[in-house]
Amino acid sequence: MDVGPAGTTQAMDDPTEKPKDLAAEAERGRSARTPALAISGVALAITALFLLIGGIALAVYLLA
């Protein structure tokens, strides 16, 4: 338990369980958050790919 404002106690979530829960929720597809989870996952993958290609292009430009 963690002590919150005014001495109240509140339970803290276990951060290691959260990604597993989100993945299971996205697989089930029965939640209102499923589209947002899917779109954010695709956006992260595209951003990572863009940064990788941009980094390679910048390295080629500077080393050429």
Image (cartoon, helix red, strand yellow):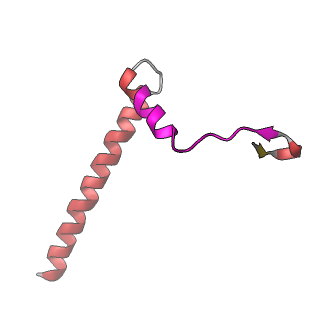
* Quarter of the rendering occupied by the N terminus: top right
Magenta stretch?
A: 9-25
Give x and y (percent) for residue 55.
Answer: 24, 67
Give x and y (percent) for residue 13.
Answer: 62, 39
**Residue 40 higher or lower than 54, as above or below:** above
Q: On the picture, is 50 further left or further right than 20? A: left
Q: What residue sits 44% from the left and 26% below the top?
A: 25
Depth check, front residue: 5 or 47 = 5
Q: On the picture, is 14 further left or further right than 10? A: left
- Image quadrant of residue 15? top right
Give x and y (percent) for residue 10.
Answer: 76, 38
Q: On the picture, is 19 further left or further right than 11? A: left
Depth check, front residue: 53 or 26 = 26
* Residue furthest to the left: 64
Q: What residue sits 35% from the left and 47% below the top?
A: 44
* Quarter of the rendering occupied by the C terminus: bottom left
